[in-house]
Amino acid sequence: MVKIVIPYYSSYGHVYSLAKAVEEGANKVDGAEVKLVKIPETKEVREAMSSQDAYVDAQKQQEDLPDAVHEDLIWADGIIWGFPTRYGNMPAQVKQFLDAAGGLWANGSLEGRATSIFTSTASVHGGQESTILTSLVPLLHFGLIYVGLPYGENPEQLTTEGIGGSPYGASTIAGSDGSRQPDERELVMASRLGERVTKVAAKLAAES
Ligand SMILES: Cc1cc2nc3c(=O)[nH]c(=O)nc-3n(C[C@H](O)[C@H](O)[C@H](O)COP(=O)(O)O)c2cc1C
């Protein structure tokens, strides 16, 4: 059995759609047990966004999912993080969740486990790559082993079109008004990411 947790944060639902595709891919691996959990919203952002219908509707769709807790990270053999960009970086909600997990860092509790990231940006150049690359830094401090999304398995990446997906991880592009939804190629790459991390996590867990 290999245990995978997918902690994600999504304001408007794009990352949530990718998260479900990642979950579906992880579940393709025999013996996988997969948990999809949402990283809690902050009071400040909930209040600031409460007048936006798109935010309120997307939060409603996710309300039945359990909140991520640090025990989920301890439980898992593999951790696949999902979050939209905030100025080319991870959102404060995710940073807060990681900052509060300092005990796991200090004890080396997550060292040697597989990890990866999927993301969403408004625009093609709004942080598709920087969000993943900058977020990799704290994950390496936890001793996690990063699993990317190679071209060989993901020929969709070899395009000049404005779609998500890179060697760094799965992604989508929401559009400046949030109206673009993940396209089929982005969902397929997200699913492959889930499957790949799960396979690596199983191998690492078998060796430890
Ligand atoms: C505070 C804030 C900062 C953002 N910064 C960026 C940015 O730097 N580049 C960009 O392309 N999109 C930016 N966005 C847009 C979000 O990334 C976009 O809404 C998100 O990818 C949609 O994913 P979601 O539906 O899962 O929330 C920002 C949005 C907010 C609210």
Image: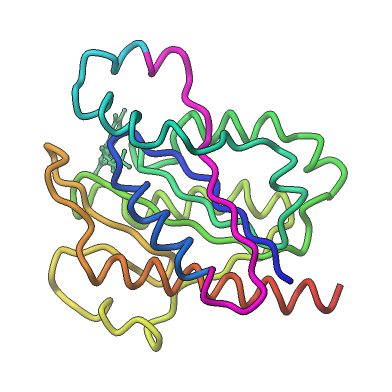
Q: In which quarter of the image is ligand 1?
A: top left
Snapshot quadrant of residue 37? top right
For the magenta stretch, what is the residue range? 27-46
Q: Nearer the viewer, residue 179 or 166?
A: 179
State the count of labels: 0
* 44 in the magenta segment: yes
Residue 11 horizontal/vertical position (percent): 33, 33
Q: Point out residue 182 in the picture as x, y percentages from the top left corner.
A: 23, 57
Render colour scheme: rainbow
Residue 103, by quadrant, is top right
Q: Residue at x 72, y 50 (%)?
A: 142
46 vs 125, nearest the viewer: 46
Q: Residue at x 43, y 64 (%)?
A: 169
Residue for point 35% across, 71% down: 189
**Quadrant (top left/top right/bottom left/bottom right) for the C terminus:** bottom right
Place residue 10 in its image quadrant.
top left
Q: Which residue lies furthest to the front in this view?
A: 64
Q: In this view, does 136 lie to the left or right of 57?
A: right
Q: In this view, does 13 lie to the left or right of 37?
A: left
Residue 48: percent from the left, percent from the top? 31, 13
Residue 40 x/y as whole percent: 52, 28
Is residue 165 placed above or below 20 in the rendered structure? below
Q: Is residue 121 magenta?
A: no
Name the residue nearer the viewer: 72 or 115: 72
Above or below residue 2? Residue 64 is: above
Q: Which of 56 and 31 is in front in this view?
A: 31
